[in-house]
Image (cartoon, grey):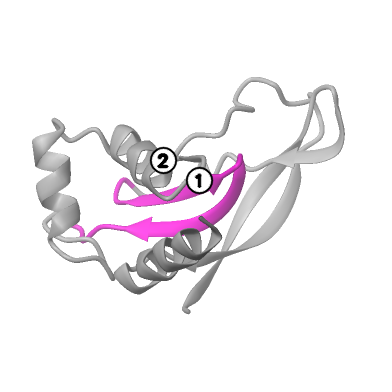
């Protein structure tokens, strides 16, 4: 499995001792982080012309077209199919502690068809 390290900022989460929120504000228009249970876990990158997603087959573009190009909805739905809580937005937006900024390096798995197949296989074995 391939990984990427992103430099980003983090903030303490109000009401949650020592938990940090990673907004990934420096991402380009074609880059996304997928949060699993509100923890950044996967990196998803589309080509600059948005005609393909690196590591994923054309299915993702077909699914995006079919759902009106709503990436968030597609990611949430894909996570649900695998019994996972996925999103491209953290639930902690707006819940950060002022003046708690910190620079971080976060290691993410690059989301690919192979990773998705492994998750599905693992999920089926649990049930």
From mark 2 to mark 1, how far is it between C-alphas? 5 Å
Please tell me whether residue 23 is drawn above or below residue 119 in the rendered image. Answer: above
Q: Residues within 10 Å of mark 1 (few under 14, many from 20)?
A: some
Residue 115: x percent and y percent? 41, 69
* Residue 18 covered by magenta stretch: no
Q: Tell me what residue is drawn at x 34 percent, y 35 percent.
A: 72
* Residue located beneath label 2 in the image: 80
Residue 69 in the image, given as x and y percentages of width and height: 17, 35
- The single residue placed furthest to the front in the displayed view is 127
Q: Of residues 100 and 42, which is closer to you in this image?
A: 42
Q: The magenta stretch spans which residues? A: 29-48
Examine the image and state in which quarter residue 104 appears.
bottom right
Q: Residue at x 61, y 52 (%)?
A: 8
> For the stretch drawn in magenta, what is the main secondary structure?
strand
* Residue lying furthest bottom: 1
- Residue at x 70% of width, y 43% of height: 10
User: SS for tag 1?
Assistant: loop
Question: In this orientation, does residue 122 appear?
Answer: yes
Q: Viewed as shown, does residue 13 lie left or right of 3?
A: right
Classed neighbour count for the residue bearing mark 2: other residues with Cα under 10 Å, few (<14), some (14–19), many (≥20): few
Residue 72 position (above or below residue 84): above
Q: In which quarter of the image is residue 14?
A: top right
Residue 49, percent from left and from top:
13, 55
Residue found 48% across the figure and 45% down from its top: 83
Seen in the picture, residue 120 relative to 91 is either above or below; the reply is below
Residue marked by disc 1? 84
Residue 40 magenta-highlighted: yes
Q: Cβ–Cβ below 8 Å for labels 2 and 1?
A: yes
| Residue 17 lies in quadrant | top right
Q: In this view, does 1 lie above or below 66?
A: below
């Amino acid at each position: 499995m391939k990984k990427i390290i992103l430099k980003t900022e983090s903030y303490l989460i109000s009401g949650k001792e020592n938990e940090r929120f990673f907004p990934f504000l420096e991402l380009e228009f074609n880059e996304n982080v997928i949060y699993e249970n509100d923890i950044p876990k996967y990196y998803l990158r589309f080509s600059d012309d948005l005609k393909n997603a690196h590591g994923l087959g054309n299915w993702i573009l077909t699914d995006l077209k079919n759902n009106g190009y709503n990436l968030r909805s597609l990611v949430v739905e894909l996570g649900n199919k695998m019994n996972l809580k996925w999103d491209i937005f953290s639930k902690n937006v707006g819940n950060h502690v002022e003046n708690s900024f910190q620079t971080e390096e976060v290691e993410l798995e690059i989301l690919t068809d192979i990773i998705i197949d492994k998750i599905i296989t693992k999920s089926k074995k649990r049930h």
